[in-house]
Image (cartoon, helix red, strand yellow):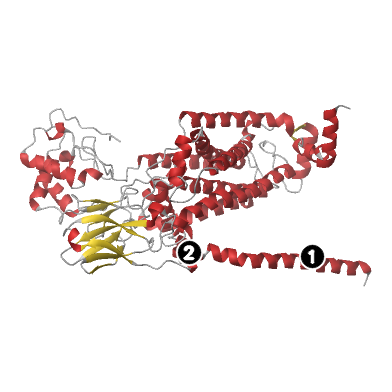
Amino acid sequence: MSRTRRAYEWLDRRLGISTVIRPIIEHPVPRSVNWWYVFGSATLIIFVVQVVTGVALAFSYVPSPLSAYASLEFITNDATLGHIVRGIHYWGASAMIVLVTIHAARVFLTGSFKYPREMNWLTGVMLLVLTLGMGFTGQLLRWDQDAYWAVVVAAEQVGRVPLIGGILVQLVVAGRTIGGATLTRFYAVHVFLIPSLMFTLIGVHLYLVIHHGISEPPTPGELVDPDTYEEHYEEILKKDGVPFWPDAVWRDAVFALAVGAIVLGLAIIYGPKELGQQADPTIIQAFPRPDWYFLWLFALLALSPPSFENILIVGLPILSIVVLVAVPFLAPDGERSPRRRPWAIAIVGIGALAIVLLIREGQLAPWSPDLNPGPIPANVTAGLTTSQQEGAVIFQQHGCINCHTLAGVGGKRGPELTTVGERLSNEQIVWRVLNGATNMPAYNTTLTPDQVTQLADFLTAMNGESAPGGTPQTSGTR
Amino acid sequence: MSTTDKVLSRRKFLNRVVLGMGGAAAAVISVPIVAYLLSPLINPAKNVWRDLGPVDSFKVGETIAVAFEDPSPLPWAGETAETAAWLRRVDQTTFTAFAVNCTHLGCPVNWMPGAELFLCPCHGGVYYKDGTVAGGPPPRPLFEHEVRIQDDHVQIMTRGLQVG
């Protein structure tokens, strides 16, 4: 017997490799398992990547408001290949959120959550929620202005919970204001609390995958019956089962390697998310935006009617979790194939479309005023009377341009005014300026009557023909 | 009664003892941990007056950002030891101070001196110079800090993050 062989046998008798471990990794799976089944394992691999890069980042990151930002600058700019490590962690977070969502959608579409795999689904739901929790707490650790205001916005949302809102806010920010205790709190949650929960749940999730076996790709018309399902599944394995390792795992390996290559590529080409300005509550000129995976919520909160908002802020997260938890109880058996479950396709399709559209809206954020608009183009004011030109200055200086686009400059909160002179008479404009509207301030106390006249004269002249060469533009500059 | 029953009841007893002792130990060790984690609630910092400078350094009719230290900030709080507010000198003897947080979701409102409006960069909330809502989603006027004049100095009362 060779030396290696002897060493292996020594280990085998002590570790149970051939009696316990090999049967597990070589457990039979249906031959028909296909490329739709690779998202869960890829999520797991990215989770491992996140753990490894996270531990590496923790070697240098200092979780105190005094030093967090500086330590991130060190990691990004000075530490050897630090920006790549941070880049992998940043893009890995995005990849994990995308993959875990696709994995959940696939399991839902193929009805794999049905008997006997309800607990696979429920532990998966918890892992999905925890992954989002990792994304949220992780973006805060950058401790730039976006991070600081994300804590404030999160605290305000938690504060909408009836009765105990105030108490919850103090627990979230660790006190009455954001300060020294806040960052360590999020650090502990991001680095210890949620990961330990995730390790446990991933363990249970994987145990259940082995215990119940990988669900067979559904055949239309083949219904799940709890009385006969196990027998049926055993038969599939007996008739046409292949060992998971290596007959099925090669697809997982190929896909996970591709995902890993993409994450690494993005980390090298684009690097980590740029650090914003250091968190400083006394610098008020901030434009807080969440990372992309929460932009849909940011957009939803801007677009929802205010009267509905409290219900939305408190109710939506609770409702989402309740619905996800209810799924395997609402449809524990019966048809699995998406071809016979058109509503399942509709739910996933509409959900995905809604999220994509909301993220897009969140990026554009037309509801936010433009706080630093450029000057009104000179060709707009050329050829105007002195009074009208005064009006243009008022338009620029008194906040109109922050919400209204004029010749391609300005905000998109209110209607575009490039050709307002065609739509409204001078009297109508005066009335609107003085009285405001639902989302427009009334200027009757801020502007003098003369200023109102000048402003209205200027806007009346905006009829699309006055300005020489002033072709009205419809798109903004942002 | 058979011997088996006796054995089972002995096992039942041991089972309960082990689970009971484990539960009791977990409960005991939880007390300090939970109390420690709840300390921001149990032992909150008291709001205090902070000096903003001589009255004469503020112009009547002007609204400016002021920064002041939080009550008992931690030594490692860095920049976050301070909080900002918008201070408006209404007339010779009256000052108003607004929390910078939009009452919608807490984003920092910006003062536009020309327009005499506060604009929120997040969801487009707008407030008049007196803090009342001029437009957008905010459900209520800007939160105010107490302000007083003491020995010709303007002083502001700290306040926690307010929720609408």
At label 1, counting other C-alpha atoms closer than 10 Å, the crowd grade (few under 14, some 14-19, many 20 or more) is: few
Residue B11: image x %, image y %? 84, 65
Residue A142: image x %, image y %? 45, 44
At label 2, counting other C-alpha atoms closer than 10 Å, the crowd grade (few under 14, some 14-19, many 20 or more) is: some
> Which chain is mark 2 on?
B
Can you see residue A439?
no
Image height check: is A164 above or below A76?
below
Q: Residue at x 48, y 66 (%)?
A: B41
Q: Which quarter of the image is occupied by the N terminus of chain A?
A: top right
Residue A323: image x %, image y %? 55, 52
Tell which of B31 and B54 is nearer to you: B54
> Which chain is mark 1 on?
B
Q: Residue at x 52, y 50 (%)?
A: A187
Tell me if A240 is positioned left or right of A176 in this view. right
Tell me if A75 is positioned left or right of B18 in this view. left
- Provide the residue designation for mark 2: B40
Can you see residue A99?
yes
Residue A260: image x %, image y %? 57, 31
Please name the amino acid that badge 1 sits on. Answer: Asn
Q: Residue at x 53, y 30 (%)?
A: A264
Please name the amino acid that badge 2 sits on. Answer: Pro
Q: Which quarter of the image is occupied by the C terminus of chain A?
A: top left
Tell which of B164 and B34 is nearer to you: B34
Residue extending furthest toward the right = B2
Q: Secondary structure at mark 2?
A: helix
Tell me if A184 is positioned left or right of B18 in this view. left
Label ID, residue B15: 1
Q: Residue at x 45, y 58 (%)?
A: A173
